[in-house]
Image (tube, helix red, strand yellow):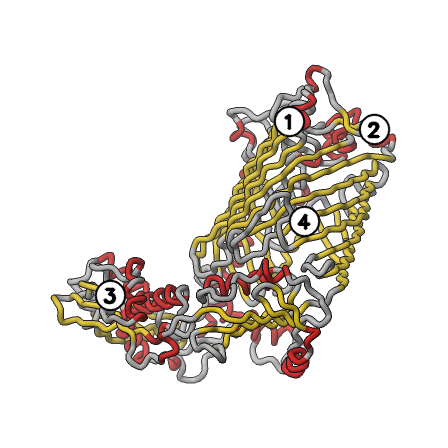
Amino acid sequence: MKALNRYLIIFLLLLLGSSCSNTKRLPEGELLYVGGKVKVIDTTVSRKERKALETELKALLRPKPNTKFLGLRVKLFFYNLAGEPKKQKGFRYWLRTKAGEPPVLFSQVDMEYNTLLLQNYSENRGYFKATATADSTKRGKRATTEYTAYPGKQYHIKEIKFPTDSSALGRAVTATQDKTLLKKGEPYDLDLIKAERLRIDGRLKEQGYYYFGPDYLKVQVDSTVGSYETDLIVKVKDETPSKARKVFTIGDIIIYPNYSINTGKRRLDKLEKDTTAVVQYKDFTIYDKEKLFNPRIFDRTLYFAKGDLYNRTDHNLSLNRLVNLGTFKFVKNQFTVSDSIDTVLDAYYYLTPHKKKSIRVEVLGKTNSANYTGTELNVNWSNRNTFRGAELFTVSVFGGLEVQVSGQNNGFNVYRIGSEASLIWPRFIAPFKLKSSSGFVPKTKATIGYEFQKREQLYALNSFKGSFGYLWKENIRKEHHLNVTDIHYVSPNNVTSLYIEQIAANPTLAKVIEKQLIFGPTYSYTYTNTMETIRKNTLYYKGSVDTSAMLTGLITSANVKQGDTIKVLGVPFSQFIKFENDFRHYIKLGPESQLASRIIAGVGYSYGNSTELPFIKQFFIGGTNSIRAFRSRSIGPGSYLPEPGASAFLPDQSGDIKLEFNTEYRTKLFSFIKGAVFVDAGNIWLMNRNPQKPSAEFSKKFMDQIAVGTGIGLRFDLSFLLLRTDFAFPIRKPYLEDGQRWVLDEIDFGSGSWRKENLVFNLAIGYPF
């Protein structure tokens, strides 16, 4: 620890010294702008309101000063350190233009503009009598600005008035007032008024007013109605064109499913003259000379029917479903007023299909914390629109190799090879009719696959799997995945005498090579709003339930405890139910920083024909995406620690219960490089007591058996790829004796033996959560 402290002190002194040099390279007569402050002065405004307004006004000031990291202008330091590069390439050029940041000069600050900005913003928030002044302070070669705002008392809404005229449009606008965003007694807010115009426009779009827009609405402000009160009067502008005042219905629906952007107009003219190209199906006129698509696709996808009142919801749902079919790479829609009736819209859909058949080759590299470095080759062949119904048929072949480049187990390399075929139908296939009103196309998916895995000198596994189920989204946030049946069969072969010897020393290794037959329904539900980047707090949740042979076990009355083990094809089937929950929370701490946290809680219960979960369904913990201070699958269960020889052979600890917590502070350092500080904690446990694994079962003392690790990392965000590196070390080891599990006092970065035993390097692609 002393060596670490010494290095940190030297590093901080260097940074502090560098910050002093940030003003040495300024142009002659220039000052470094180091920021501005805003003070709100007014006795009519409460202290809490003043502080909130000061925060809002300060965020408006321009330009922003040079960014800081730990209180230091590191980017400006790099900019000055690089000097003037002689070439537009090389390290110095990168350091100056990518990692660095030019100084923000005081001459760039327009205090008059900022003063007007503060005043206008205050007025838009209801402080109609607001004024502001500006001043500056110079210290050495640094300058700051100080702004003083005098907002006056804020105006509040006394009454909201909607149109009272008898026109259809006026009545339609007035009918929306039940959901108005404007409330009596609330402060005046221009942004809220703009949002109210958008809300009214959205409601009118649901009622057929296709050509109406928010700009045809105005909200007049009458501030003479009382002391610091105002009336808001919603009106339709007199200059609103007649077309925007009309309600439209849907007329003809014309679809071009093989539209080419390059030869679009010329090809369309030909098609429309060719009577053999036209397919009339229900309300749709489809120009499909090659008969590429079954017309039923469009009946399932498009929500509009002839004679329907136009509404924006059906408009957007139709477009979303066409895009989510996955068959068309471009989707274009156009509405035009009918030649015969001026209140009817003809709908045109121009669809450009993907290439029917394609092949994709992927080469992946990976490294894990058990010192295995590997590569994988995936070849995927796809056939879109396989049976003319927008189906997607995919066949993939893969092969991989993982080589242990260091550690005691060198030589137990892993080879994998396999194939998988899947067919996705863009609809529910079921004995009874199911319908989805979502903008996302429901899907039925059937999959079959095989994998051969060989661990050199130890064993080989044959794995077969098959599934049939449904995927559907309620909306952009909520997704469901139900497999009506999900079958896994695992069979070992070529088990070596070396592995059998190790089983004698560590019987839990036998679970890896047991024959396993799993079949039953599975279900998962996912909710996320992480795509809403404007939110300060976002969430991700995935809950899943996995079952096997519930009905079969009930019918056969299987009970392994009484010796009634039932076999299918000579293999005892597994009977269990397993629940897992993954909850994540992200909070923005600044424009380029956030705190990400995750909680995983899972439990599996075996019964009937099984005494424990099958190995491939058990919980594991540790590794690059889990508790990064411990090797993969090396923790637990509980405070159990295998014998030294057994633990050194293959870390493959598993359990029936899992609890894990991770939190990580992420921030941008410079350019494409981001940094992180993290803490991981958790463990796994057995549901029942196992004499061969003392202290491994779940009990009321489970919190005493939590493993904790911490560390730092760098993320290299290359847009198309995020490369993650983490250095982690344990601070609590659950397998030590009570009272000795916290090992903070043992940390010694200067000790080679400590680093070898405790410091873990993780290299991975993507964030851990």
Whole-percent x and y of residue 450?
A: 79, 44
Looking at the rendered structure, the secondary structure element under dot 4 is strand
Q: Which label belongs to residue 433?
A: none
Asked if residue 5 can be seen in this view, the reply is no
What residue is pinned by disc 1?
Answer: 606
Whole-percent x and y of residue 462?
A: 81, 39
User: For the point 75% across and 36% down, which residue is it?
Assistant: 650
What residue is pinned by disc 2?
Answer: 500
Foreground pick, 748 / 560: 560
Looking at the rendered structure, the secondary structure element under dot 1 is strand
Q: Earlier in the sequence, mark 3 or mark 2?
A: 3
Whole-percent x and y of residue 124?
A: 27, 70
Q: Calculate the distance from the C-alpha at mark 4 to the C-alpha at mark 3.
A: 53 Å
Amino acid tagged 4: Lys
Question: Closer to the observer: label 2 or label 1?
Answer: 1
Foreground pick, 197 / 429: 429
Q: Disc 2, disc 1: CB below 8 Å?
A: no
What residue is pinned by disc 3?
Answer: 188
Q: Calculate the distance from the C-alpha at mark 1 to the C-alpha at mark 3.
A: 61 Å
Q: Earlier in the sequence, mark 1 or mark 3?
A: 3
Question: Closer to the observer: label 3 or label 2?
Answer: 3
Quarter holding residue 29: bottom left
Quarter holding residue 508: top right
What residue is pinned by disc 4?
Answer: 445
Q: Is residue 214 left or right of residue 477?
A: left
